[in-house]
Amino acid sequence: MHFLSELVKKPILENPFEQHLNIHRHFYRYSKGEFIGPALKITKTKAKITMKGAHEYEDLILEVVTKTISNSQENFEIKGKLITSSDIGNSISELGLNWVLKKSTGKTKNYKADILDQINKDLLLQTIDIFREKSYLLLSYNRNATCKVTTKKNIPQPSKKKVEDDDVSKRIQFCIGMINNTDANLEMLIDLAATDFKSELPNNWKSIIILNNYTINQIEIPTNVKDTRLLRIMAIRKGKMIRSVEIDGDLIEKQYTIVV
């Protein structure tokens, strides 16, 4: 499940670093203040549904497109990159993937794998589920005009803009996915991306934009840790998540008190 969907269901986390790393890690970089979070735009025509997402929505778009594949065992080509902060070589091997993980040599300590592989639906969904806890899976594939996903290979720098100056149209070019416009596909997508707005969506909408912004009011620093890097990573952020959906120009907003 996408980390924002989990946070909507349980916005106040107990021991975020130890028990909810898949959510907690998305808040490492935030200090006190107001911050722009990931955004997703969904448009639909009679034939297809198009998803355009900012960074941190690529795993949801990849999951949605992959779930629409009918043959779960048919192999298809994927390409892209895996970026992670941990040595997950054992997980790669256990999944039977031939991805070579290399440790970075720069200041940012992480691991990367360049990907060009053949995979099937079931294995890819399993891979997404396992790797989204500690990694960013930046994958692309093209099966046909209504079953494809395109993701950029480099993670963008965090936005320094104020919330009111956000350039959403630019940010949502990071990952683009397309699927057939069927009732089942649309329901699956809304359940995964915007279940908290499901009852407010009219039947005849053409375009929705989901925004997620954060206000961090308090940071709890662990008292028994001296490593400054670990202090930042393990610190608990408290504040609000402001989720809004723009439906064909009309705006609906919900706020959640969060402990992450």
Image (cartoon, helix red, strand yellow):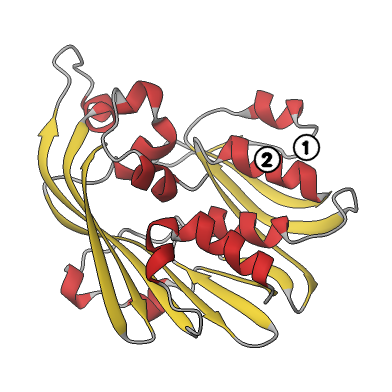
Q: Are marks 1 and 2 in contact (CB under 8 Å)?
A: yes
The one of 23 and 117 positioned closer to us in this rendering? 23
The one of 243 and 235 positioned closer to us in this rendering? 243
Question: x and y percent of residue 229 in the render?
Answer: 26, 29
Instruction: Give the residue type that dot 1 points to.
Output: Leu
Residue occupying the point 73% across, 40% down: 99
| Residue 78 picture quarter | bottom right
Question: x and y percent of residue 70 in the render?
Answer: 84, 59
| Residue 253 picture quarter | bottom left
Is residue 223 placed above or below 153 in the rendered structure?
above
Question: x and y percent of residue 65 in the render?
Answer: 67, 62
Question: x and y percent of residue 46 in the render?
Answer: 66, 88
Instruction: Give the residue type that dot 2 points to.
Output: Thr
Q: Real-space Cα distance between discs 1 and 2?
A: 9 Å
Residue occupying the point 59% across, 77% down: 50
| Residue density around tag 2, few if under 14, some if 14–19, many if 20 or more, within 10 Å | some
- Secondary structure beneath dot 1 equals loop
| Residue 92 picture quarter | top right
Task: Tell me if residue 154 can be seen.
Answer: no
Judged by depth in the image, the label closer to the viewer, 1 or 2, is 2
- Secondary structure beneath dot 2 equals helix
Numbered-mark total: 2
In this view, the residue farthest toward the top is 224
Q: Which residue is mark 2?
A: 127
Task: Tell me if residue 71 can be seen.
Answer: yes
Upstream in sequence: badge 1 or badge 2: 1
Taking the image as shown, residue 79 lies to the left or right of residue 2, namely right
The one of 160 and 35 positioned closer to us in this rendering? 35
Q: Which residue is mark 1?
A: 97
Residue occupying the point 50% across, 36% down: 133
